[in-house]
Structure formats: structure tokens, C-alpha cells
Image: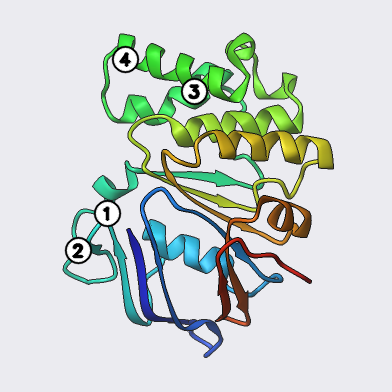
Amino acid sequence: MIQFDTVSKLYPLGNAALSDVTFNIEDNEFVFLVGTSGAGKTTILNLILGDLYPTSGSVIVDDQDISSKKYTKLEELRKHIGVVFQDFKVLQDKDVFENVALGLRIQDLSKNKIREEVKEVLSLVGLEDKKQHFPVQLSAGELQRVAIARALCGDRRIILADEPTGNLDPKTTWDIMKIFKKIEHERTIIIATHNTDIVNSMKKRVLVLKQGKLLKDMQKGGYEL
């Protein structure tokens, strides 16, 4: 479970990225974070990942208060969180297999285990025949599939996606969302987006943010700009 308890995040000049935000996300729940640029979506993702700390309030992930100054297991926690970025963040000098396997190598798994896991996730995202291709040989949609496969590898119980379809055409966008639907009952998925078509069609839980405040929390919700 992920819990935000009256979380505020202020920056040095006094700008409030978040203001008294409270919500709970259950295990294996699918949630959209929506709002215009600057609403606080990315800040929430970074707080869950431990890249930021709240100015006040608490952030609980898997029953651990990661916002506490006494918390010392952040690196261990991050092994269980996969992140998908809008700009893919793949390594240009590595082929698809190596890009996906990177996180597993850090965990010091055996070569056989790495091969098995990479093969499984590449099949899931439809790239099993592209494992020896380099990023320059791939389309934008294929690059995002690589990023998703990398995020899924290992014991990743939480998937955070920040505008994962922002650089994609409409057809490719839906192809990517189908991948998230395949795993929606196996992992906690939190997607920050301003794509109204996706949110309104998929009818998942929607947290609506505006200027750092949580305006709405809707089950099977929608979103209007």
C-alpha cells in the first residue's frame, strides 16, 4: 500500500508543489494522476520513489515511512519500484537485451535467471524478436516498450509512469496502454498523464490535481481539461 498523509512539498522560494495531499493506494491498484503541467503529478511520483522528501506530512510505502529521516532502506525499496519515463531513458550504446537486463545485473542475479526474466518481459511487450537491436534501430513506440520491459524486470511490485505516451502517436499510445492492462492485476500501477482520451476510456481510479492540491478522487473516473 502507498499512503500520503497531509503531504506538502514546498520549494526554497515558497512555491508549493503539493499542499496537504492525502490518499491511499492499495496493492495492485491502477491509478491515474491527472492535471495540467505543474499540478504536482511528477512530485508525487518522486516522493514515492524517494527522490524527494515532503516538507511536511508522511509518505508510507509498503508499511515503511520513507519520509522519515530515520529511514535507511531506500535503495532496497527502489529495487521493487519500476519507473517509465516520457523520454524513455534507454542507453544508446546497449542493445535491447542489455537495456532491459541492466537492473537485474545490479541485483547480481545469475546469467540464466537474467536470460529467463528478460525473455519473459520482452515477450510481454512484443519485442522478443528485437532483443539484439540498438535504440537507433527502433521506433518511438518500440523504445517505450523497452522502457516498460526494463521497469517490469525483477520483483517490481510498483510501476510509476510519468507521461509514458507523451511522445507517441495515438495508435502507438493505445498499444502501450494495452501492455499496462496486461499487468494491472499483478502490480500497483500509477500513471501521471494529461491524455484525456486514455483516462476517460479506461475508467480507472483518477486523482485530479490542481496547483498542488488534490481536487477529486474518483473510482472509474474521467478527466476534463
Q: Quadrant of residue 146?
A: top right
Is residue 26 placed above or below 143 in the rendered structure? below
Dot 3: what SS? Answer: helix
Residue at 72%, 23% (x, y): give it.
136
- Residue 74's disc number: 1
Gap in Å between the C-alphas at discs 3 and 2? 32 Å
Q: Which residue is mark 2?
A: 71
Q: Position of residue 68 (x, y in %)?
A: 23, 71
Of helix, strand and loop, which one carries label 4?
helix
The residue depicted at 69 percent of the width and 65 percent of the height is 222
Mark 1 or mark 3: name the one nearer the start of the chain.
1
In the rendered image, is residue 91 in sight?
Answer: no
Q: Are marks 1 and 2 in contact (CB under 8 Å)?
A: yes
In three-dimensional space, the C-alpha distance between marks 1 and 2, rounded to whole angstroms, equals 7 Å
Which amino acid lies under the numbered mark 2 shown in the image of this protein?
Tyr
Image depth: mark 2 or mark 4 in front: 4
SS at badge 1: helix
Q: CA distance from mark 4 to mark 1?
A: 24 Å
Between the C-alphas of marks 1 and 3, the distance is 25 Å
Q: Nearer the viewer, mark 3 or mark 2?
A: 3
Q: Which mark is residue 121?
A: 3
The quadrant of the rendering that contains the N terminus is: bottom left
Q: Earlier in the sequence, mark 3 or mark 4?
A: 4
